[in-house]
Amino acid sequence: MSGAASSAPASGLRIPAPGVVIPLAAIAASFVVGFALMALTGSNIGAAIGAFAQGAFGSAYAIGTSLNRAVALGLVGLGFILAERANLINVGGEGQIAMGGIFSTAVALYGGVKGLPYGLAVLLPLLAGTLAGAAWGALAGVMKIRFGTNEVISTLLLNFIAILLVYWSVQSVHLLRQPASFAGTLPQSLQVPPSTTLPLLTGNPADPLHIGAAVAVVLAIVTALVLRRSAFGLRLKAIGLSPTASHRAGIRTDALMVSVLALSGAFGGLAGAMMLLGDQGYLTAGFSSGYGFDGLVVGLLARGSAAGVAAVAIFFGFLRSGGISMQISAHVPAALVTIVQGMIVVAIAGSAILIERMGRRA
């Protein structure tokens, strides 16, 4: 008996840990329930599954598009976990994306950058969008330390202001709206110059994965190092545990709160600039498409881990692409796709809580 038991490890068979099995089972169950709901509403399940697979990873173009979506989601998620380390909740990703889109568009179109050498034609609009997002995040930090405004409320309300600023920018010919050449001219900006768009990693238009993916990977690594191995990350953790004790220990808590919210907003602004310069090419109302709120979910599910942000963002990027394809190709109602995506989010969050409780009992 003991010999049989001792030979089990030597066989090379290993039972997957609950931390892997439970989330995968929860996601699989969510898909099963979701497709069952589609069947009840009369949707063709085979067509829906095929459309999802084709839209998510059915071609090099689909994979590149999915990863580009993951880049934007991941950047917002990285900003979220940075602020979360100081016990600050930044729910303003949508507004920070919007501000990044406005300012990157303005600089790309009217900043005189399209003829600049050495990549400056791309870098300067990206920098403008990043700084705009940082200013939007810092504003919430200033409101917190000067007036005691809860950052959840301020960042949430700043979302609506930024979204309305996008709407104003593309509606006004004195701002970013393209010149009206005929009565049906759409309320949007001009197309940004080709020299200001993000270069593709492969150089092949059939694979739209742009250089933002490489930038996001570098930023994820830097964020992980900052949170785990830097004095800045240690100070943020101290503030998160006790702002009062940190202040008494000589840490400039007010300045750090503003700084980390600005840094968190900078990630959102960079995401907006990359969406504009890497995918869409022009500014229009609603261009952020809920990426800020989805990025918030990515940050929440990552539980403070930069690697977790990357994994969840990639999953959500493919999930978004597949959902869009189901709507277009299989004619699955948009509301039903949103319900299925929401069920998956709840399943992942619930599995994380279950794993945490199991760990405590062990």
Image (tube, rainbow, N blue to C red):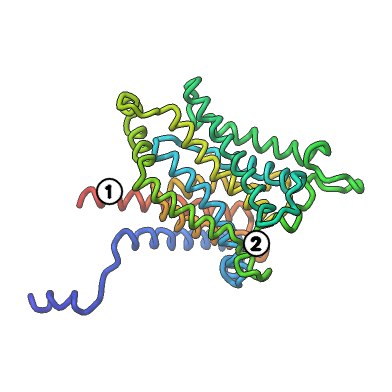
What percent of the width, then of the height, locates residue 285? 72, 44
Query: Residue at the location (49% across, 44% down)?
Result: 79
Q: Which mark is residue 219?
A: none
Q: Amino acid at mark 2?
A: Pro
Query: Residue at the location (44% across, 27% down)?
Result: 254
What percent of the width, then of the height, locates residue 335? 61, 51
What percent of the width, then of the height, locates residue 257? 45, 32
Inter-mark Cα distance, 2 to 1: 45 Å
Q: Amino acid at mark 1?
A: Arg
- In the rendered image, which residue does mark 1 sit on? 357
Residue extending farthest front: 117
Mark 2 or mark 1, whichever is nearer to me = 2
Q: Secondary structure at mark 2?
A: loop
Q: Is residue 289 visible?
A: no
Counting other residues with Cα less than 10 Å from the Cα at mark 2, is it few (<14), some (14-19), or many (20 or more)?
A: some
Tell me which numbered mark, 2 or 1, is placed earlier along the sequence.
2
What percent of the width, then of the height, locates residue 137? 54, 35
Residue extending farthest left: 2
In this view of the protein, which residue sits in the foreground, 124 or 211? 124
Query: Residue at the location (53% across, 62% down)?
Result: 35
Q: In the figure, is residue 5 to the left or right of 79?
A: left
Identify the image quadrant of residue 62. Answer: bottom right
In this view of the protein, which residue sits in the foreground, 59 or 279? 279
Counting other residues with Cα less than 10 Å from the Cα at mark 1, is it few (<14), some (14-19), or many (20 or more)?
A: few
Q: Secondary structure at mark 1?
A: helix
Q: In the figure, is residue 292 to the left or right of 82?
A: right
| Vertical relation: 84 (above or below) 326 | above
- In the rendered image, which residue does mark 2 sit on? 199
